[in-house]
Amino acid sequence: MIFLIVLVTNSTKILKNSVDVFIVANGSLSFEEQAEGYVIRDEIVLQGENYKNGMVQILSDGERAAKDESVFRYYSNSEDNILDKIAELDVEINELIESSSLNSLLSSDIASIENQIEDTIDSMYDLNYLQKIQENKNKIETNMSKKAKITGFASPSDSYVRILAEQRRNLENELSAGSEIISAPVSGLASYRVDGLEEILKVDNFDYLTSELLNGFNLKVGASIPLSSEKGKIVNNFECYIATSMDTEKAMTVKVGEMATLRLSNSNEIKAEIAYIKEEEKSRIIVFKIKDEVANLLEYRKISFDVIWWKYTGLKVSNSSLIEEDDNTYVERIRAGYTEKILVKVLRQNDTYSVVENYTDEELRELGYTEEEIESANKIKLYDEIMLH
């Protein structure tokens, strides 16, 4: 009796395994590795003679600057009173705008500024990092000043708001007359995040890069570069570079000019070209060139990211469904209780799955198939049931 029970149980398993199937679906396979790297930019540091006085941003951090456009200015020696008066006028103008019909004058520029103010306030609720809170506070004050200026001069010429706006402009002119204004020598992104590495991490030649140099900076991954109160800079907004040290099997075989995809901490995936490779004793310095997300990386010097060396999308099947015969690969499709063998081309494979596609007619001719065989050849399709072996 025991023998019969074991036999029946095992027979049931054999029958069950023999008809296990896999449903063909659309899917992706990729090969990726984690890395940490340093952002290297084409950047020009701006500093004037009166940097000890403190500075006022004319362009916001990350804002586009044209060549010769004013970026920031240094305080004059006696301007505290003027700044206080400007701040008071900003408050008075904005209060008049909110309490009157002047809201009907809102342009798309002012609507955009108001949205920025609201977004900044919303982002501050969960902050407990003092530097970030102060940065957001400064951003709100800057946007409030912009709104006051734009709305003030959009008001009727005889309105009280227009009069206050004129007073504000006169005070600004008085400040500018005694201030040192710093302009952009080239076009690019204005930034005030200066960390002292701008003159070390250069983009004209990467031969200076070593693992020892990069590790010696002792930077925390994902830490924000603090805003400077003395300097600014202009950053090339078209491209930047990420340098990393890697010793994986794949990293040791890639070549300059090859493409990869980088997944940043915000989950955005961007195309990257391998611009430079330097061989070290047991690893490599690899420099990726990117043209997207340049503005979003202004805040950081050291980042973590994923290197996606390759990624294929197509019909995804289990490796257990593949049959190797005479240097060809097949799957067995089940339809109406019958099986039929289908020739497939494997594009990529990992330990569990493969991405496959059908051969084209031209490829089948090159393999020696006749026109009759090509015409009658079965094709794998989405949602097909194929046998697992």
Image (cartoon, rainbow, N blue to C red):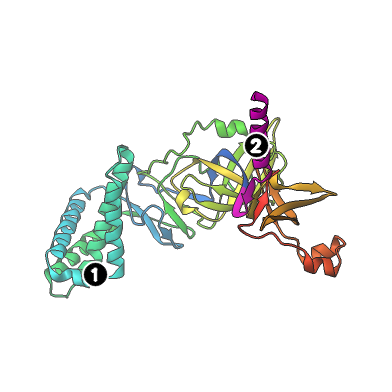
Sooner in the amino-acid sequence: mark 1 or mark 2: 2
* Residue 12 highlighted magenta (yes or no): yes
Chain part drawn in magenta: 1-29
The residue lying at 29 percent from left, 43 percent from top is 134
Residue type, label 1 = Leu
Q: Is residue 212 visible?
A: yes
* Residue under pointer 2: 13
Residue type, label 2 = Lys
Which residue is more in the foreground, 240 or 348? 348
Front disc: 1 or 2: 2
Answer with left or right where residue 160 lies relative to residue 380. left
Q: CA distance from mark 1 to mark 2?
A: 74 Å
- Give the answer, above or below, for where 196 lies relative to 151: above
Q: Quadrant of the N terminus?
A: top right
Question: Can you tell which mark lies on residue 342?
Answer: none
- Give the answer, above or below, for where 233 lies relative to 110: above
The residue lying at 20 percent from left, 67 percent from top is 152
Rendering coords of residue 125 (x, y %): 27, 44
* Residue 19 highlighted magenta (yes or no): yes
Rendering coords of residue 328 (x, y %): 81, 51
- Give the answer, above or below, for where 206 lies relative to 98: above
Specify few, some or many for label 1: CA neighbours under 10 Å numbering under 14, 14-19, or 20 or more. Answer: some
Q: Element at badge 1?
A: loop
Rendering coords of residue 337 (x, y %): 68, 55
The residue lying at 54 percent from left, 41 percent from top is 38
Answer with left or right where residue 146 lies relative to residue 155. right
Answer with left or right where residue 275 lies relative to residue 299. right
* Residue under pointer 1: 106
Q: Element at badge 2?
A: helix
